[in-house]
Image (spheres, rainbow, N blue to C red):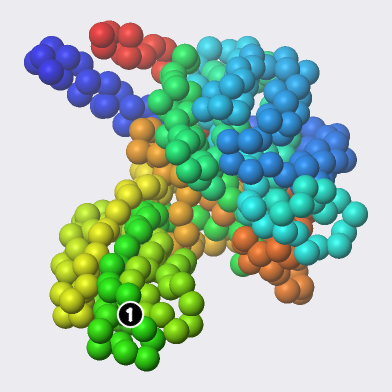
Amino acid sequence: MGRKRYVLILVYLLYLSTFFFPVQSWSIDQKTRQSIEQEIEKYRAEIIKIRRFIHMNPEVSNREFETAKLVASKLSSLGLEVKTGIARTGVVGLLRGNQPGPTVAIRADMDALPIQEHNTFPYRSLNPGVMHACGHDIHTSIALGTAMVLSSLKDRIKGNIKFIFQPAEEGPPPDEEGGASLMIKEGVLDNPPVRAIFALHVWPDLEVGKIGYNSGYFFASSDNFVITIKGKSAHGARPQEGIDAIVVAGEIITGLQVYFKRALDPSEPLVVTVGKIQGGNRSNIIADRVVMEGTVRTIDEQTRSKVAIMMETFLKGITQAYGATYSLAYEYATPALYNHPDFVRVVLPGLASAVGKQNLIQIKPQMVAEDFAFFAEKIPAFMFLLGVKTPGQPSAPLHSPYFNPDEKAIPVGIRAMCHLVLNALEQQASLKSSPTEKIQ
């Protein structure tokens, strides 16, 4: 990199720090607040109808064809500039405000899970073996609802809002690319360049009206591994003549839970889970091969970087003791989700204004993963948790066949998103130009 370019990038970063992290916190005016509430009420029934249609017609990752058509049609009807086919089935709608300014984005995921729904309400899934068990139908509906509300307020918008509808958040099928990383690769954050991005995730541990947030690392990284144990087959009655791959696998599964807890700082969260195991041919044959698949979750990047090497050391020791061999395939998949602290500090007052300070709850880091983290690696980002639990009622967890978020949370999510993006744009209203054009 040339010295001139290096200096220009430093100037740009300084500009961004002023652009996004000013000392003053803005709040949208009372007239705009009232307009948002009126528009939410105006579109409430339609948004609920859209959500139920999406819930009835779920589609798995990279196969969100009909969902994408619905989203694109709705955005087009609102007058947004629409692009389709991004990262296979992704859709992007650009709402240009009537006043000049930068661009911020809202991201919503569209894919469902390969789960058979067990709910019995009339709008349950009509697609056997597929269900919106992670609330992406709610996410998509809230983003569409936000587009409906804000498109009616174009004259007050100082800049642009890019609505990013992402496929494959749950992970693309084997041998396919997808999700946030592919959208970024295909330029979703460009033309016009996105300066900051927002997202939400439904959260069944929080009641409707509550919003959870955290500053810094919020969700864990998610990496995958496949361990293959190779032993020696023999008759089940003569184990001394073989090397039992199932016994070795059992030692590994149990040992992994102890090894990392004793070898790493216990204050750094780490979860190692073996979720799938296959091996053996029949009851009276010593198994000569076992394959295990699992996931590793951690918040700390230094810890994350150590796990694969430590796992190799551990596997080598266990298999050598039994005379077996092994192979390890380790995939670094999704990074930890980072809510930029300075950005959080700026957006929280607007969020509190939208839902009430008493309804904001700081949440400790969670070990679930979200590929919104790829966006957060590129630009300032903020994800929050939207309460969807009906007060006084039990709530099924995410990825449960009984998951049933309370639809009363949808207007709350729309209100929060409207306030967040309008405040973010308002904060930069006094800035006249951007130095980005000087960087070649």
Residue 360 or residue 163, whichever sits in front? 163
The one nearer the camera, 271 or 285, is 285
Question: Which residue is found at the position 54% from the left and 47% from the top?
Answer: 170
User: Is residue 427 shown to the viewer in this render?
Assistant: no
Q: How many marks?
A: 1
In-image side of 172 versus 262 (left or right): right
Give the residue at the far left of this rendering.
3
**Residue on which disc 1 sits:** 234
Query: Residue 165 or 420: which is nearer the viewer?
Result: 165
Mark 1 neighbour density, 10 Å: few (under 14) some (14–19) many (20 or more):
some
Residue in the image at 33% along x and 9% along y: 437
Residue at left offset 36%, top offset 33%: 378
> Residue 343: percent from the left, percent from the top?
40, 41
| Vertical side of 189 occupied by 319: above or below | below
**Where in the figure is residue 114, as x and y percent of width and height?**
64, 53
Amino acid type shown at disc 1: Ala
Q: Quadrant of residue 134?
A: bottom right
The quarter of the picture where the N terminus appears is: top left
Q: Is residue 47 above or below residue 204?
A: above
Taking the image as shown, residue 179 lies to the left or right of residue 207, namely left
On screen, residue 137 above or below 254: above
Image coords of residue 387 (percent x, y): 65, 58
* Image vertical order of residue 301 relative to residue 237, above or below: above
Quadrant where the C terminus sits is: top left
